[in-house]
Image (cartoon, coloured by chain):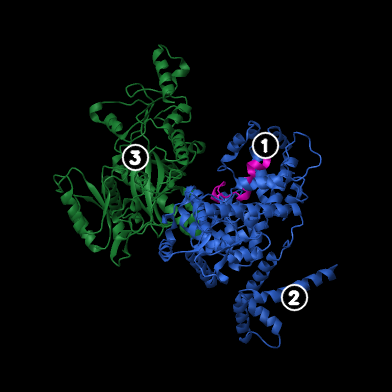
Chain colours: A green, B blue
């Protein structure tokens, strides 16, 4: 496949004059030679070029994107160029920044006296009484280390029986993550860590979150949800939820006993971790569709709680995006597809674990490949204007047909049109995804 | 004429009154009625009226009606002797082959069909009961006893003698078997609500409801379904299921229509079955483990539920109620000695106690229930009721109109009569049309359709209380994909055209097939 594209690109370079029709053809560049991408680009008859050439569409790595948008590069994109990342996507995808942004967002709403920021007292299952946001409590209590170490200790002491999960901010795929259930263990870790744990000296920062120790189990196994969210603009916010998501199951039964604390196969649902477990099956890859999850929940727990859960998931996504919308560089050339990782607890409450700006496009199973192929296909039809040529001037209002398997989550521009008197569209009106 | 009918009803009532005393609910039911009689609401002067009224209020009326309903359903013509000797002969021969195969597997592997399980093994099994997927067994040398394709070969040889056959005409039609099956018109009459175009939940849940007060058909059905479930009267539930059930009510409705709702008694019985599994090691256990691993554990729709499935399938194998209720329909099961037990009356066991030897894919009869029931006991009883009422007919040879032989014949007849071009195409490329759909029929489409579609199909099986919808669906799918089938001429390629059913919308497809004038 790749050779063909290269051949086509070479032929074009050889020509001196391009016929009028060819001039309209889309040129793409990609840092990632994944089959789900290449087959989609080729199907559209695009020709592949290098990063230094005139590209219309760039499926870039986050590093490339950062370079392109950096002040030093001086690169100026024209109106017919689109790229698949926002310049400062890390506001959403870095664990520490995500937490900071959401905390700030909530505080702002509180200051404004917005009813969304309503707080109430909650009794934890250990008996402790804490204050939580009623409507915006979708991230577990999290602190950035080493900066918030003292705040963390204070919170920790409130419920000393709890387990906490340590995650390095800049890593992915489950690398470097571990659980602690004793403060002494954390101190031990900091002593043993390569970089000394001094706030001023440490380069690596971590987040430490309250571990969700009561996850919803199906078949006795823990799972998390991977959902794809496409954002074509942050101000006004335009976001779309892909209907085809999946649950990633741990290959081993969930066990909260202390001995299992170190068994990453039980706790982490990342496929890259599970793949190396003894029971990994590469026919299904431990993945179940979100549709089947919904079917199961409706069948065993009833309609009302299932609908409530899925609404809460949409709510969570919308507010996480609103939380960063003010700090995101809303470059017109950009769109981004995020991989949302969500855990559902046994009260059927969803929790945001993290947001990935470069969700994996590797396929682990046949169904996986089909899903990711459709994902890319639908992303392209949503972000491109109806004539299929990138143009930043278009109104970014995809037709129902162009959406494909995407459901509109929120479009603040449309909301403004419907209710011009509403204040800055803070209240989300998510469409019900089915 | 009425007089005769009255007489029949009277006789049936007498018979029922006698047999009801043997039913397990009788004792507690009688006690409840006695309590009512002692209450002030029931008056001696107007005994019949007041008692009936009081029973209605207490829900005993519904209970009794349900009991009668379920009893009547089990009384249906039980063939004591299969009128077609060729079929009963073939069935006996097949059974012999299966038993032989089991015995030879057993001696090859130098094990016993049945033996007492050593205590350490019992403990380990009990320990891992809720996560049997972690119970390690070396199953490499075990093979399923038979697979659908083996069974199909047996059915195809039921051909027998075809008087007028040309030299090169393959002997593979079921049509010469003297069994009567329905025509499409007759099926249309049977599925009356569908063929008259009534709105079905599985066709378009979001369409506008014709009933005032409800926005969508789905909302209307949910509301009606809740009332039906609350009433709990089985024949009404059955009627309701004809037009499809919302997923949130299915678990309850299915249990009601099958009479499989569980109480303490059932939980105790299930635990006894578990105990049997622990105590006696049957070779069938290895086959069960193997089957779950080969099918459910590899299926992306069901792998999550594998642990429950182990429990359900193992307990099923020990359930002699199954053999009891299916007497006459499942041949004569093997009886073996339990190694390690003193020679006595209970050192013999039917192998397995349920009388049913599983084949490759047998687990798939149970997997869809995982989307309805969390509790293994409730799951077990509903699955068991389905098996006793329907599924066993799909893998035993009989002349029963709902049996697999009749269903194959029905499929053939429908195909020839309603898709003649396809029929001819199959003949031209020398493929027996039953080959491409048999695995669907034998498994009632489980594992071939996604669960949400499958559950809608099984609603219809319950609602109309028959399996004829299976060959009808097979026909409808073939018809839907006929253009692609015309393009190919090998069995492999036809299979490829039909391999992926994930985009099939079962109910609209069926309704379309039924509505065509």
The tag on residue A357 is: 3
**Label 3 is found on which chain of the structure?**
A
Total marks shown come to: 3
Q: Is residue A49 shown above or below A411?
A: above
Nearer the observer: mark 2 or 1; the answer is 1
- Observer able to see residue B210: no
- Residue under the image location 61 percent in, 79 percent down: B27
Report, in whole angstroms, how far the alpha carbon at label 3 lies from the one at label 1: 52 Å
The residue identified by callout 1 is B431
Percent x, y for residue A381? Answer: 46, 33
Residue nearest the observer in this picture, A171 or A239 = A171
Percent x, y for residue B449? Answer: 57, 47
Q: Are marks 2 and 1 in contact (CB under 8 Å)?
A: no
Residue nearest the observer in this picture, A159 or B256 = B256
Report, in whole angstroms, how far the alpha carbon at label 3 lies from the one at label 2: 74 Å
**Label 2 is found on which chain of the structure?**
B
The answer to whether B130 appears left or right of B13 in the picture is left
The residue identified by callout 2 is B14
The answer to whether B393 appears left or right of B283 in the picture is right
Task: Tell me, yes or no, whether the highlighted magenta stretch contains residue A373.
Answer: no
The tag on residue A347 is: none
State the residue lying farthest toward the top.
A16
Which segment is the magenta one?
Answer: B430-452
């Amino acid at each position: 496949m790749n050779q063909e594209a290269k051949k086509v690109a070479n032929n074009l370079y050889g020509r001196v004059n391009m016929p009028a029709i060819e001039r309209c053809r889309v040129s793409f560049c990609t840092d990632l030679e994944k089959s789900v991408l290449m087959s989609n680009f080729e199907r559209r008859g695009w020709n592949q070029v290098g990063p230094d050439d005139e590209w219309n569409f760039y499926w870039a790595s986050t590093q490339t994107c950062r370079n392109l948008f950096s002040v030093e590069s001086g690169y100026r994109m024209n109106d017919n160029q689109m790229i698949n990342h926002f310049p400062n996507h890390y506001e959403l995808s870095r664990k520490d920044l995500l937490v900071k942004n959401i905390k700030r967002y909530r505080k702002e709403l509180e200051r404004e006296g917005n009813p969304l920021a309503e707080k109430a007292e909650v009794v934890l299952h250990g008996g402790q009484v804490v204050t939580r946001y009623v409507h915006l409590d979708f991230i577990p209590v999290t602190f950035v280390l080493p900066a918030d170490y003292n705040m963390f200790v204070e919170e920790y002491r409130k419920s000393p029986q709890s387990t906490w999960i340590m995650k390095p901010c800049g890593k992915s795929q489950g690398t470097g993550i571990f659980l602690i259930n004793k403060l002494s263990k954390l101190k031990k870790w900091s002593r043993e860590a390569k970089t000394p744990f001094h706030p001023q000296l440490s380069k690596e920062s971590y987040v430490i979150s309250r571990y969700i120790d009561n996850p919803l189990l199906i078949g006795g196994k823990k799972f998390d949800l991977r959902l794809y969210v496409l954002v074509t603009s942050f101000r006004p916010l335009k976001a779309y939820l892909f209907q085809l998501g999946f649950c990633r199951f741990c290959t081993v039964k969930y066990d909260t006993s202390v001995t299992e604390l170190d068994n990453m196969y039980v706790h982490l649902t990342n496929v890259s971790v599970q793949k190396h477990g003894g029971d990994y099956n590469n026919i299904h890859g431990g993945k179940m569709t979100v549709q089947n999850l919904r079917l199961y929940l409706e069948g065993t727990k009833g309609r009302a709680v299932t609908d409530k859960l899925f609404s809460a998931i949409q709510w969570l996504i919308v507010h996480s995006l609103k939380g960063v919308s003010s700090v995101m560089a809303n470059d017109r050339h950009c769109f981004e597809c995020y991989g949302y990782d969500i855990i559902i607890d046994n009260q059927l409450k969803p929790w945001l674990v993290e947001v990935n700006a470069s969700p994996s496009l590797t396929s682990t199973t046949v169904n996986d490949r089909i899903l990711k192929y459709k994902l890319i296909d639908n992303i392209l039809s949503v972000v491109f204007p109806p004539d299929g040529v990138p143009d930043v001037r278009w109104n970014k209002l995809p037709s129902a047909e162009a959406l494909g398997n995407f459901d509109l989550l929120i479009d603040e521009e449309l909301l403004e049109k419907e209710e011009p008197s509403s204040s800055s569209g803070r209240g989300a009106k998510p469409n019900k995804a089915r | 004429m009425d007089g005769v009918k009255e007489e029949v009803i009277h006789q049936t009532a007498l018979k029922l009154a006698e047999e009801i005393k043997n039913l397990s609910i009788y004792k507690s039911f009688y006690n409840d009625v006695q309590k009512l009689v002692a209450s002030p609401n029931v008056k001696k002067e107007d005994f019949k009226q007041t008692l009936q009224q009081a029973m209605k209020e207490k829900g005993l009326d519904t209970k009794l009606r349900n009991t009668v309903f379920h009893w009547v359903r089990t009384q249906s013509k039980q063939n004591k002797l299969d009128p077609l000797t060729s079929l009963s002969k073939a069935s006996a021969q097949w059974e012999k082959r299966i038993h032989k195969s089991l015995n030879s597997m057993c001696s090859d592997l130098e094990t016993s069909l049945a033996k007492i399980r050593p205590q350490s093994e019992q403990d380990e099994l009990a320990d891992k009961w809720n996560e049997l997927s972690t119970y390690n067994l070396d199953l490499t040398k075990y093979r399923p006893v038979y697979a659908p394709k083996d069974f199909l070969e047996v059915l195809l040889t039921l051909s027998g003698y075809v008087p007028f056959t040309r030299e090169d005409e393959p002997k593979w039609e079921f049509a010469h078997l003297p069994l009567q099956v329905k025509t499409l018109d007759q099926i249309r009459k049977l599925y009356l609500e569908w063929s008259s175009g009534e709105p079905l939940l599985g066709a378009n849940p979001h369409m506008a409801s014709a009933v005032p007060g409800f926005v969508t058909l789905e909302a209307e059905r949910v509301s009606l379904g809740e009332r039906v479930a609350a009433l709990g009267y089985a024949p009404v539930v059955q009627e309701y299921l004809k037009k499809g059930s919302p997923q949130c009510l299915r678990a309850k409705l299915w249990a009601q229509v099958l009479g499989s709702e569980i109480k303490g008694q059932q939980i105790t019985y299930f635990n006894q079955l578990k105990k049997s599994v622990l105590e006696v090691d049957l070779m069938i256990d290895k086959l069960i483990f193997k089957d779950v691993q080969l099918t459910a554990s590899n299926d992306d729709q069901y792998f999550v539920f594998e642990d429950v499935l182990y429990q359900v399938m193992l307990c099923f194998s020990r359930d002699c109620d199954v053999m009891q209720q299916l007497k006459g329909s499942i041949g004569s099961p093997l009886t073996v000695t339990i190694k390690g037990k003193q020679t006595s009356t209970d050192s013999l066991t039917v192998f397995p106690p349920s009388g049913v030897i599983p084949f490759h894919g047998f687990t798939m009869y149970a997997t869809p229930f995982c989307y309805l029931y969390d509790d293994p006991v409730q799951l077990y009883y509903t699955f068991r009721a389905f098996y006793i009422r329907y599924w066993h007919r799909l893998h035993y040879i009989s002349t029963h109109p709902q049996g697999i032989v009749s269903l194959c014949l029905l499929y053939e007849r429908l195909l020839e009569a309603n898709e003649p071009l396809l029929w001819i195409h199959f003949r031209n490329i020398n493929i027996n049309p039953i080959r491409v759909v048999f695995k669907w029929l034998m498994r009632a489409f489980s594992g071939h359709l996604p669960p949400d579609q499958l559950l809608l199909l099984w609603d219809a099986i319950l609602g109309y209380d028959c399996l004829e919808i299976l060959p009808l669906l097979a026909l409808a799918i073939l018809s839907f994909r006929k253009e692609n089938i015309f393009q190919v001429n090998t069995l492999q390629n036809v299979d490829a055209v039909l391999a992926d059913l994930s985009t099939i919308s079962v109910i609209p497809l069926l309704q379309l097939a039924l509505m065509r004038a």
